[in-house]
Image (cartoon, helix red, strand yellow):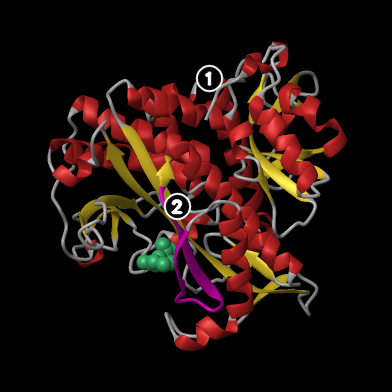
Amino acid sequence: MTDRPAAAKSHQPDPHVRRILERAELEGVELVRFLYADHGGVIRGKAASRSRLAERLTTGIGHTVAMMAMNMLDQLQEVEHMGPVGEVRIVPDPATYVPLPHAPGAAAMLSDLRRLDGSPWDACPRTFLKDAVAELATEGYTLVAAFEPEFTLGRRLPDPAGGPDRLVPIDDSLCYAGTGFDTAHDYTIKLVRALETQGLRVEHYHPELGPGQQELSVRHAAALRAADNHVLYRETVRGVAMRMAMWATLAPKPLAGQAGNGAHLHLSLWDDTHNVFADGGEVLECFIGGLLAHLPALTALTCGSVNSFRRLSPRAWSSAYAVHGPDNREAAVRICSPLGETGEPNLELKPSDSSANPYLSLGAVIHAGLDGIRRKLDPGESVDVDPDTRPGRYQRLPASLDEALDALEADEMLMEALGPLRRTAYLAVKRSEAVAFSGMDPSYELFHHMRVF
Ligand code: GLU
Ligand code: MG
C-alpha cells in the first residue's frame, strides 16, 4: 500500500487514479464508498459520486473529527479535539478499489483519516496498523494474518412483546451437518462469489455449531491487507444477506446460551526468506510470550464490545484463559499444526471477534508480539489439556469490557503505542458503551450488537 499525502499537489496524472476512473466507468459504478472503522468498531464512511471521483481520490472527503468520539449507539462522547470544530479528510487508498457485487452500482475503498495538510491524523486506525507494521519491519519481520470469522444467518423479525427486533436463525442444523450446507446454500454461494469478486480468496466453509451459525474463512495476507479484507468481509456478509431479505450478524454472542461468533486471528511472522514460526524456536516462543503478557489489555482491542465478553467463557471453544498450547482449542493462543507439507505453521489468537476495529486489533497484536521478541518474554508452560479442568492454575481473561479496559489503561506499552489522542478517545467511547448497556435488558444489548456488527 502506498502512503501518498502529496498526491493532491502532484501535476502528474496518477496511474492508480486513472485506472480507478476507467474501471468505475466501465463497471457502471455511480458511488464509491470511502470506508473506515471507528473506535466503536463500526464501519462507516462517505461516498463520492463518479463525477467527483477524480478529485476526491486525491482530496478525500471532508469529515468531522467528532466521529472518532462516537460510540456504537451513535452517542457522541466528550473528547478534547473531537468536538464540533475541526476537520479531517477521508482519503481512500488507491490500491483498495473494489466494486461491491452485493451493491450493484457501488464500489468501496478502504480509507485513512488525514489532516488537511495530507499527513495522517493521530486518531486514524489504519495508520496505527501501518505504523505497527513499520515498527515490526525495523526488526526485519513482516506479519501475515487472516481473520477466521463466524456469523449467524437468519431473519430480522419484530418482537411480539414489543421489545427490540429479534434474529430468528435460518436453521437448527447440527455442527458441520449436511443439512446445514443446504439450508444456507443460496446465501453461501452468493457470499463466496461476492468475496471472490472483491479479491478475497475463500478457503473453507462449514455450517457451525449454533443455530444459523456459519463459518467461512478467507486466505491470509500481509497485515494491512488482512485488516482491509476483514472490513470488506463484514460488509459483504451483511450486504448479501440484506439483498436476500435476510439478516446476518457477526456479533460475538447474538443468541443467549448459543455458540458465540469468534474471528480468530491467524498469525505468522516472516523474515526475508521464510516463515520464522516454522523454525519453532525462540522467536515463536517470545512472540507468544508477548501476546500472553499483554493479553488482558489486548482483549480490550481484539474483543472490543460489551457483548464480546459473553463469548469468552470456558468450554465454549472461544478461550477463557491466558495460556498457549499446540492444537489446544481452549487456549487463548493455539499453535496450529500446518495443513500438509506446504501448509504454514501459524498461531491462532482466539480472543478476537468481529466487533473489534480490525486495524487497532491487529496493530496492538503486532506491538504485543514485538514486545515479546524485544524483551525475550517467556510464554510459560505449554498447556495440553482444557485449562478449565485445572481450577485456579491459569490466568482467566477479563470477564467484562470494563475489566479489559482497566487492563489496557494499566498497560504502559500499549497505551504508549496508541498515543494520547487515540487512547483517550478509545477509552471514552468504550467506557461509554459499558455504561450504556449496564443494567439494561440483555435483549437491548443483543439487538444493538446485531444491528451494528
Ligand atoms: N465459536 C467458537 C468461538 O466463539 C469457535 C469454535 C471453533 O471454530 O473452534 O470462538
Ligand atoms: Mg468455528
Residue 450 point in image, percent of width and height: 65, 61
Q: Residue furthest bottom?
A: 179
Can you tell which quarter of the image residue 175 is in? bottom left
Q: Residue furthest right?
A: 51
Q: 430 or 289: nearer the eye? A: 289
**Earlier sequence position, callout 1 versus callout 2:** 2
Q: Secondary structure at mark 1?
A: helix
Can you tell which quarter of the image residue 20 is in? top right
Above or below 360: residue 386: below
Residue visible at 28% across and 50% down in the picture: 346
Above or below 31: residue 156: below
Q: Is residue 356 left or right of residue 59?
A: left
10 Å crowding of disc 1: few (<14), some (14-19), many (20+): few
Please name which of the two marks, 1 or 2, marks the residue nearer to the observer: 2
Residue 305 appears in the rendering: no
- Which residue is the site of mark 1? 420
Numbered label attached to residue 305? none
Residue 311 point in image, percent of width and height: 46, 61
Numbered label attached to residue 147? 2
Residue visible at 66% across and 48% down in the picture: 436
Q: Main secondary structure of the magenta part?
A: strand
Q: 64 or 231: nearer the eye? A: 231
> Magenta residues?
202-220
Can you tell which quarter of the image residue 410 is in? top left
Q: 242 or 404: nearer the eye? A: 242
Residue visible at 18% across and 63% down in the picture: 390
Quarter of the rendered structure image containing ligand 2: bottom left
Residue type highlighted by circle 2: Phe
Residue visible at 30% across and 44% down in the picture: 268
